[in-house]
């Protein structure tokens, strides 16, 4: 059959990919879009509607990437689109306060009581970078704990045992990051409280913050073990460090109130992205008022951004969260996700393929393994070669998956029964061809 996925790429996609290869590093504007981890070339998408993508050759795919998480209502939801188009007609950006910022801000703080104050930025990377600066400034400490396989954006301090695209390309520690910059970044295995306790004891009084995905999605979907987040909260409190939940992916995805509401654990600071912008470039960080009031201009810790609080992005995020907050909407998406995860695993097992399906809210994971991994080391021991072949076959049968086994899948409100059946039909065909 040749390279996986090649047979799904039409001549126009190939032509665009060729042009892009001469313009952009690796032919893409973000490494996670490349197909280096699965082989073949990506289809070039010209249209997205509901749960479907259409490429430049007119080929249609069911989408389980969802723009890497933001499109929880599906592509082109009419309420979001009407509001965005109306806001565009009144101006795209002014660099001034607008009514759109407090409108979204009030909604976020109503959904997450731990967020007493917040600051909008443009990306999840920027949110995590600013939260780290705040944590260091507020505590007077310099060291930070993160976890193997957790990705907090591409700021230098976080590119130590990073997840997501860095894992796919075999470069978890990036060249160009000076050793002294990551010298203060302490790394522990995910779901290992003993390792975190040892770091706190070894570096007593030096650790400003602990950053964690409270449900990992950047080494594939790996939920926190029972009591794990509670244990991290207790250790941070005991040692005077700030607990920072990176909810760029889990925020409004695993629960209306994020992972902190789902698991009942309150962080000191939270970072956001993806769903909070409804598909437009938005990030945010927020938390306790006494901490956030140390950010300029209220306090001495500097952070700024020309495009922060973009009114069009604020509008998209507000309408997305308003729809998501309606009775039964989130529950419907979560139920669809759970059903799909179970069906994918059941059908694989019936075909004699070891597989585990996981779901948390509207996030989904499929592991080719006898049991679900609990950390990065175990994720790397799953059948990565089988995933590579599976990805190519699913694409050939019209299902667009993340091109890496180390990425969660995303389900939306637009994934109705008919769409789910299309996925399962493709899944059965792909299993026969592995």
Image: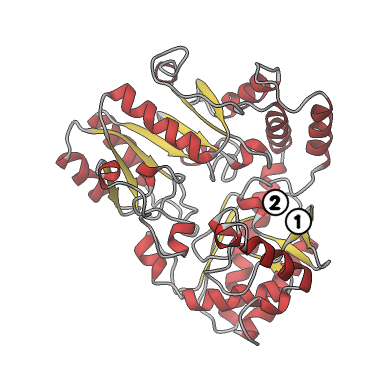
Q: Is residue 333 left or right of residue 155?
A: right
Q: Which residue is mark 2?
A: 412
Location of the N terminus by quadrant is bottom right
Contact flag, marks 2 and 1 (Cβ < 8 Å): yes
Identify the residue at image location x=70%, y=48%.
332
Q: Position of residue 326 (x, y in %)?
A: 73, 35
Q: Nearer the viewer, residue 257 or 379?
A: 379
Identify the residue at image location x=48%, y=56%.
164
Examine the image and state in which quarter residue 143 appears: top left
Identify the residue at image location x=62%, y=21%.
106
Examine the image and state in which quarter residue 166 appears: bottom left
Q: Which residue is mark 1?
A: 51
Q: Nearer the viewer, residue 386 or 67?
A: 67
Q: Nearer the viewer, residue 70 or 309?
A: 309
Q: Is residue 108 left or right of residue 134?
A: right
- Residue 232 visible in the snapshot: yes
Location of the C terminus by quadrant is bottom right
- Count of picture labels: 2
State the SS at label 1: loop
| Residue lying farthest to the bottom in this orientation | 1
Mark sitting earlier along the chain (2/1):
1
Q: Position of residue 182 (x, y in %)?
A: 29, 44
């Amino acid at each position: 059959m040749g390279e996986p996925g090649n047979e799904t790429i039409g001549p126009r996609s190939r032509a665009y990919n060729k042009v892009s290869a001469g313009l952009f590093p690796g032919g893409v504007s973000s490494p996670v879009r490349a197909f280096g981890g699965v082989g073949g070339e990506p289809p070039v998408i010209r249209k997205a509607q509901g749960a479907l993508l259409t490429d430049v050759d007119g080929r249609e795919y069911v989408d389980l990437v969802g723009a890497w998480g933001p499109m929880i209502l599906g592509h082109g939801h009419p309420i979001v689109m009407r509001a965005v188009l109306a806001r565009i007609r009144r101006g795209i950006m002014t660099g001034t306060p607008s009514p759109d910022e407090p409108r979204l801000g009030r909604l976020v703080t109503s959904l997450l009581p731990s967020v007493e104050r917040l600051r909008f930025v443009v990306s999840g990377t920027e949110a995590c970078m600013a939260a780290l600066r705040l944590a260091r400034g507020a505590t007077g400490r310099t060291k930070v704990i993160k976890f193997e396989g957790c990705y907090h954006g591409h700021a230098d301090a976080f590119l130590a045992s990073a997840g997501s695209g860095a894992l796919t390309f075999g470069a978890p520690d990036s060249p160009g990051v000076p050793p002294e910059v990551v010298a203060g970044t302490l790394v522990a295995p995910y779901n290992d409280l003993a390792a975190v306790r040892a770091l706190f004891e070894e570096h007593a009084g030096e650790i400003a913050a602990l950053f964690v995905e409270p449900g990992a999605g950047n080494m594939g979907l790996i939920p926190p073990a029972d009591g794990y987040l509670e244990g991290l909260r207790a250790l941070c409190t005991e040692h005077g460090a700030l607990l920072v939940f990176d909810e760029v992916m889990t925020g409004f995805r695993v629960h209306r109130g994020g992972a902190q509401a789902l698991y009942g654990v309150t962080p000191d600071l939270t970072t956001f992205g993806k769903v909070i912008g409804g598909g437009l470039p938005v990030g945010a960080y927020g938390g306790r008022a006494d901490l956030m009031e140390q950010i300029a201009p209220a306090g001495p810790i500097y952070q700024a951004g020309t495009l922060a609080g973009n009114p069009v992005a604020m509008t998209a995020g507000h309408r997305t969260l308003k729809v998501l907050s309606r009775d039964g909407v989130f529950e419907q998406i979560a139920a669809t996700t759970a059903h799909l995860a179970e069906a994918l695993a059941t059908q694989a097992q019936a075909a004699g393929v070891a597989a585990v399906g996981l779901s948390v809210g509207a996030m989904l994971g499929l592991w080719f393994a006898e049991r679900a991994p609990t950390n990065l080391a175990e994720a790397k021991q799953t059948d990565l070669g089988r995933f590579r072949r599976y990805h190519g076959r699913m694409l050939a049968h019209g299902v667009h998956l993340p091109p890496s086994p180390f990425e969660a899948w995303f389900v939306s409100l637009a994934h109705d029964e008919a769409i789910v059946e299309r996925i399962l039909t493709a899944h059965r065909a792909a299993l026969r061809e592995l």
